[in-house]
Amino acid sequence: QVQLVESGGGLVQAGGSLRLSCAASGRTFRRYVMGWFRQAPGKEREFVAAISGSGVTTGNVDFVNGRFAISRDHAKNTVYLQMNSLKFEDTAVYYCAAKEAWSYVSTWTEYNYWGQGTQVTVSS
């Protein structure tokens, strides 16, 4: 069982930066693939980025484009999402999620554990 708690969301102007954090409970954090997803009002949940236990990363090429970076700190049981050059269209609730296998990492239904989400609002 893994419990996830996100933080770091807020209101930022376009072009600004935010760093989201997701703290995980449990002693087996290293074994989990960690992902970030987002959901804007009226839209489907979409994949942002994922990172394996060994640090392999992948991101949504449609909008990440070097603006976002995912990382993890095993000593702190925490995964981060650094977001730079934020745009109005990045406004959404951002969710942290965990799964065991490095497969279908961009598919939200494959994740077993979810945080409660953190709101990111980018003003234009």
Image (cartoon, grey):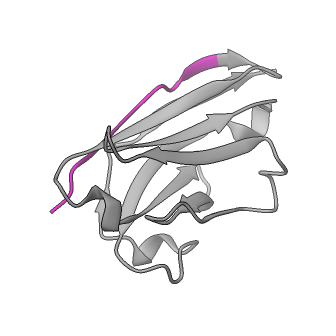
| Residue 110 image position (x, y, % from top left) | 42, 78
The residue sitting at 80% across, 22% down in the picture is 14
| Residue 49 image position (x, y, % from top left) | 61, 57
Q: Quadrant of residue 84?
A: top right
- Say which quadrant the N terminus sits in: bottom left
Instruction: Please say whether residue 102 is visible from this viewpoint.
Output: yes
| Residue 2 image position (x, y, % from top left) | 20, 57
**Viewer-side residue, 45 vs 85:** 85
| 77 part of magenta stretch | no
Q: Which residues are magenta?
A: 1-11
96 over 30 or under it: above or below: above
The residue sitting at 67% across, 17% down in the picture is 12
Q: Quadrant of residue 114?
A: bottom left
| 6 part of magenta stretch | yes
Instruction: Please say whether residue 44 is visible from this viewpoint.
Output: no
17 over 22 or under it: above or below: above
32 over 103 or under it: above or below: above
39 relative to 115 in the view: left or right:
right
The residue sitting at 63% across, 35% down in the picture is 82
61 relative to 23 in the view: left or right:
right
State how many labels appear: 0
- Say which quadrant the C terminus sits in: top right
The residue sitting at 49% across, 66% down in the picture is 52
70 relative to 24 in the view: left or right:
right
